[in-house]
Each structure stands twice: as C-alpha cells, then as structure tokens.
Image (cartoon, rainbow, N blue to C red):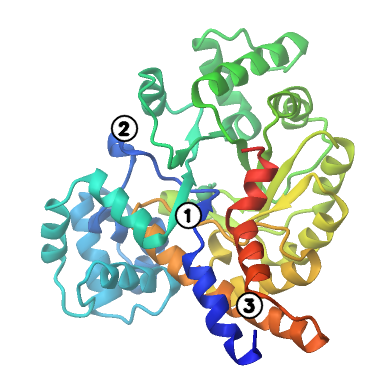
C-alpha cells in the first residue's frame, strides 16, 4: 500500500468494522422505559444539564421539578438557540439530529418529537445499531435495581445485541445500605462481613449471574480506592467478588476515579474526578493472577501509568476513554500512548451511552479520532521500513473493536 493511500484505507476500515461496545447504560427493548431514547432524553442527558446550569443558572430544585419535556426545552433554548453547541456533548446532539436527516440549525423541537412519535423503539434500535455499525452493546445491570430485577425474573427471550454486565457498586461502596437489601432478599448477611456473610454474598452473586449471564461484573470506585485494604470493601473484594469472578471465568471491570456528587444539587450530573493510586491496581493484578481485570480510570493523570501497568500484567485489559475523557483531544492523546505502549492490545473506546440515540454520535466522533491516530502510527511504521498491508489494519481494528474484549471475556 502506498503512504498516500493510508489515510483513506484506515478510515474506511475503521468505519466498516463493527464494534462491540463494552460499556453502556442502555437496555434492550424488553426492559421498557429503562431504555431511554428520543430527543427529550437526548437533551436532558446529564452532561448537558450541567452545561445548561453554566449557561443559564436557575434554582436547582426549580429545574428538577420541571417535567422532562420542559427541562429539554430549557436545554434546547439555552445551549442550542442562544449559545453555540461547540462542546463535545452539545456537538453530539447536532451529529445525532443531522443523522436523523434534519438540519440541526433550523429544525424545531416539536418537529423532532413528531419524528420520534412516528417510530417504534424496536425500529429505532435497528436504525441506531445500523447507523453506528455496532455488533452488540454491554448493558449496566444493577443487581439492586428492583425495576430491572422484575424484568429479569420474567426470563424473556433476550436480544443478542444486548449483553449483560453485573454492576455491584452498592456491595463495594455502600455496604451499609446493601446489608438490609440482601437480608430482605433472603441472604443471611451481617454488617461485619464475616465468613458466613461472605459465603452468602458469593451465593447472591452466583444467583444473580445465573439469571443475567453477565459477560463481566463491574463497579465504579473512588480515587481513594486502595488494595489490599482492611475495610469492608477490601474483605468483600478478596472473599466475594474476586473468587466469584474467578470461578465464573468472567472479568472484574473496575472504573476508578469518580468523586461522587461534588455538587449534590446536580444529582446524577454532580460527580467529579480525582487521580487514584495506580499501586492498588498493580497489587490487585499481581496478587490475583487467575483473575481478569477490565479497567478504565477517569483521571487523565492516571492514563500513562495505567498503560505502563497494563504492559506488566496480561490479566489486565485497558478499555475506553471514560466520561470526562471522552473528548476528541483526549481520546487522541490516550489512544496514541496506548498504541505506543501496548500495540493493538487494548479496547480503545466504549460509548457509556445512556440514551440509545447517543450511540450514533459517540461512535462517529470516536471512530474519526481513532482513525486519525492509527493513520499516524501506521505511517510511522511505514517510515521505519515495514510494508503495512490492508489485512494488518483489518486485523488490528477488529481486535481493538471487538476481538480483544471477546478473547478476554472468553466470549
Ligand atoms: O459509573 C458509570 O458507569 C459512569 O459512566 C456513570 O454512569 C456516569 O454518570 C456516566 O454516565 N458517565 O458517562
Ligand atoms: Zn457508565
């Protein structure tokens, strides 16, 4: 292949290679209203809510008291009509509306609402998966969410495009709240996680996994996360989550560095970021060689040391440019250092989509940046004297977009 052809070959392969999106907050249609979709949900995405308060502050409780369509109208007016939608989250809405076939500058909110009234969620799932060129997405299935559990209990036929992930944050971050909920569900647990309690937590995890058949179990963790630790989290990790994941043969996914509710008035939009101690991850991987760790960090300052750690442990797979890192400038920086340190042995991105429509923009935006970075790195390789072939690029992109995860999760 000639160097002059490289950019277009890489771009076309990146566009046409299907993605397995390893972390989203989406649900298949059988979960009903738990799956968010349509323009009002798109506009009230928490990333846009906090930006709206920057543009047009109002008393927080007044905003939250408004019905969702009114919240959406407020966001639409202040972030799109009266300001330039140049931030990543607002640009995402522009990309989404354009992909629907409307002019984002002139279309009205009611015209968009009419469009969504004319389609079914099943049709829209097909359209979005086709547009975003996705093979499947992994859901976030909270083991303590009553509404979700009622759907699981019906054991309906599953949509193979929606894989399950067992999300267990309350066990590791709010054990005090988890105890009464586990007891109510028939698991004999005490506040002090003794041997009997740990056995019951493992039984709970196994019962949940039998229902969900998760591809991994997951938790988000604070910047202060330490390992090992003589805390409830440390005891539950060592005696429940890690042995369960090992026996089940599924990775434990850790999303590290979220500072919950630095502004509580913003509710789900109120979380911040903090740099964590990468030493905890080093010790986790080193002391649990039979466990597999699927890991992302939220702080940009943790990214380089995360790549270095991933070089040392083959039971660690790095994924995504998470949340405040899901920005073209940062995706470029992170993806470049990952390729330079790890080769194509990582998962470059996940969407974290909370609204079905977002899959279109999050993957369009990320694919563009990933293609630019890959082109630069393959060009460097050609300059070094390696005759890069189209088949090399296809192999690498397929690995990064789905193969690395499938192998790691033994799918
Ligand atoms: O904990 C998580 O999975 C995070 O992704 C949070 O859901 C966060 O609110 C988010 O949506 N980030 O993109
Ligand atoms: Zn998430």
Q: Nearer the viewer, mark 1 or mark 2?
A: 2
Residue of label 2: 30
Residue of label 3: 373
Residue closest to the eye, 381 or 246:
381
Residue of label 1: 270
Query: Residue 313 location, x and y as percent?
Result: 85, 49
Query: Residue 112 location, x and y as percent?
Result: 16, 63
Above or below residue 25? Residue 132 is: below
Query: Residue 205 location, x and y as percent?
Result: 61, 21
- Secondary structure of the residue carrying tag 3 is helix
Q: Residue at x 21, y 77 (%)?
A: 103
Residue closest to the eye, 410 or 51:
410
On the picture, is 47 further left or further right than 120?
Answer: right
Q: Is mark 2 within 8 Å of ligand 2?
A: no
Does residue 241 appear in this view? yes
Q: Report how far apart the C-alphas of labels 1 and 2 lie in the structure.
A: 30 Å
Q: Number of callouts in the render? A: 3
- Secondary structure of the residue carrying tag 1 is loop
């Amino acid at each position: 292949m000639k160097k002059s052809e490289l950019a277009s070959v890489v771009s076309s392969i990146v566009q046409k290679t299907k993605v397995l999106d390893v972390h989203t907050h989406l649900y298949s249609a059988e979960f009903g209203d738990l799956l968010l979709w349509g323009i009002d949900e798109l506009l009230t995405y928490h990333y846009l809510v906090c930006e709206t308060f920057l543009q047009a502050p109002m008393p927080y409780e007044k905003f939250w008291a408004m019905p969702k369509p009114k919240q959406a109208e407020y966001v639409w007016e202040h972030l799109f009509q009266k300001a330039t939608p140049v931030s990543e989250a607002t640009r995402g809405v522009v990309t989404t509306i354009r992909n629907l076939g409307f002019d984002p500058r002139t279309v009205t909110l009611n015209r968009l609402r009419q469009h969504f009234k004319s389609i079914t969620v099943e049709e829209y799932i097909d359209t979005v998966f086709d547009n975003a060129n996705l093979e499947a997405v992994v859901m976030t299935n909270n083991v303590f969410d009553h509404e979700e559990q009622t759907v699981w209990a019906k054991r309906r036929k599953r949509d193979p495009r929606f894989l399950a992930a067992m999300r267990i944050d309350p066990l590791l971050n709010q054990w005090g709240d988890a105890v009464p909920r586990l007891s109510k569900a028939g698991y004999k647990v005490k506040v002090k996680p003794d041997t009997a309690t740990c056995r019951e937590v493992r039984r709970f995890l196994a019962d949940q996994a039998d229902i969900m058949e998760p591809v991994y179990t997951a938790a988000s963790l604070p910047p202060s996360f330490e390992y090992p630790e003589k805390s409830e989290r440390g005891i539950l990790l060592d005696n429940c989550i890690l042995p369960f994941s090992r026996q089940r043969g599924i990775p434990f996914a850790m999303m590290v560095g979220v500072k919950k509710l630095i502004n509580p008035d913003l509710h789900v939009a109120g979380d911040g970021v903090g740099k964590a101690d990468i030493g905890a991850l080093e010790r986790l991987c080193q002391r649990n060689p039979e466990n597999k760790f699927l890991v992302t960090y939220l702080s940009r300052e943790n990214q380089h040391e995360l790549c270095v750690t991933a070089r040392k442990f083959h039971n660690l797979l790095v994924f995504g440019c998470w949340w405040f890192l899901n920005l073209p400038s940062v995706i470029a920086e992170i993806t470049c250092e990952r390729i330079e340190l790890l080769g194509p042995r990582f998962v470059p991105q996940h969407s974290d989509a909370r609204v079905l429509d977002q899959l279109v923009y999050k993957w369009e935006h990320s694919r563009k940046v990933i293609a630019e970075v890959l082109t630069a790195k393959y060009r460097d390789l050609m300059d070094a004297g390696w005759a890069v072939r189209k088949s090399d690029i296809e192999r690498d992109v397929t690995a990064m977009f789905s193969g690395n995860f499938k192998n790691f999760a033994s799918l």
